[in-house]
Image: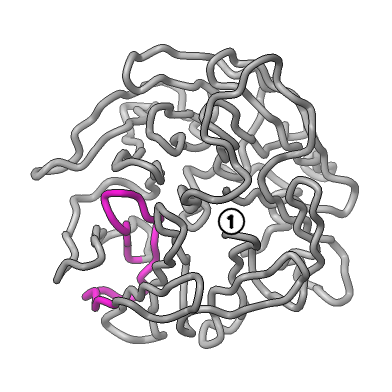
Amino acid sequence: MALAAASIGAVLILAVPFLNSLGGNQPGTAGSPASGPVSAEAPRLPYSITVANNPGNPLDTWWATIRDDKTTVQNPGVKGELVARLGEGWLVTTGYPDPLKSQAAIVSKNGKLRPIGPLEADTPAISPDGKQLAIPVAPHGAKDSQVVVVNVADGREVSRLRIPTPMLSSFGWNKAGIWLYANNADRTPMYLWQPGTAEARKLPALGAEIALASGSDTFGYSTAEGAGYCAKAATLGTSGPEVKRQYCSDKPALHGVSLSPDGGTMVVGGPWVAVDVAGGKQTKLNLPAGLVGTSPVAFENATDLLVLGLVPGKTPAKPTAQTIYRCRVTTGECKALVTEKRGEVFGLGQR
């Protein structure tokens, strides 16, 4: 939860589960490819700004402002994180640091807060069509958890399922279903549940993090290969992953595997390469050398994505600022859009 860590050191991540593939068909984000040169206009997806050394927020663990295109909203009292754009507002988490008060909520454009779903909630995931939320509920100390599905429009519960594991969290929701895991070091056991079915499918171990393509059944994951890794785009068959494309490296610096909403492009952080899943074409993204991704990338449309990251300084005592870049996966062109001011910490949301 401590977002301030991103400004004082490199955060090496594969993905943040409740930021990965959460956006369904949200208004305001085009699905068609972009053309012409990459724009240097403000990010077309939401990002949060946490203000360090704020007396009202001594732990620097929740955002002060959300910026989304030309809209700016002040925090109405949320103690949590920005998740994604949702309809005419933004999905956030709140209740930190008390797990009994943890809950999903929606912040409107006029700054009003609407809690949604049960308490003791974790990592809400948006359905592919943007009309429902899947909310894992993991009561402290309980042996079992539940996943609860609610309507975004009215908050009404429409389905729930018991999952026989404690500390349940979600990676997200795509056309294959809701991807769930036990929030422990190796993320096992892992489950896939399609609402409307009587039980969840128990999955083989797929690693610590999963990236989802919200508009398809494709998912991304990585495996260790000697001193390096292989990043993989796959679908789930009857006996396990069916790999469609992989990118392997003998270098250990992997900063994330992400997918475009249609599952057609896999982006590998670290080498910063966009891989066409169908044809295999690899496009190097023209980002600063040594850039460390501090959040999963977020696609604005079919070809343009946002990267939040920093280049570590030579002296740990002098942290470098994060910058949001826009890159085009078809050409590799990238442009810097906005950089943190002193005392700020950015957090990138999804569409």
Is residue 25 or residue 235 the one in the foreground?
25
Q: Position of residue 192 (x, y in %)?
A: 24, 58
Q: Position of residue 87 (x, y in %)?
A: 58, 59
Up-down: is 187 above or below 121? above
**Residues packed near mark 1 inside 10 Å, few (<14), some (14 to 19) or many (20 plus):** many
Residue 43 x/y as whole percent: 73, 39
Q: Indicate yes or no whether the magenta region holds residue 310.
A: no
Q: Which residue is pictured at 80% across the width and 73% down the height? A: 57
- Secondary structure beneath dot 1 equals strand
Which amino acid type is shown beneath numbered disc 1?
Ala
The image quarter in which residue 29 lies: top right
Q: Quadrant of the N terminus?
A: bottom right
The secondary structure that most of the magenta stretch takes on is strand
- Of residue 116 and residue 292, the one placed in the foreground of this image is 116
> How many numbered discs sit on the rendered protein?
1
Question: What span is colored magenta in the figure?
Answer: 160-182
Q: How is the image coloured?
A: one colour
Residue sitting at x 69%, y 49% = 6
Q: Which residue does the numbered mark 1 point to in the structure image?
A: 84
Seen at 25% across and 76% down, the residue is 161
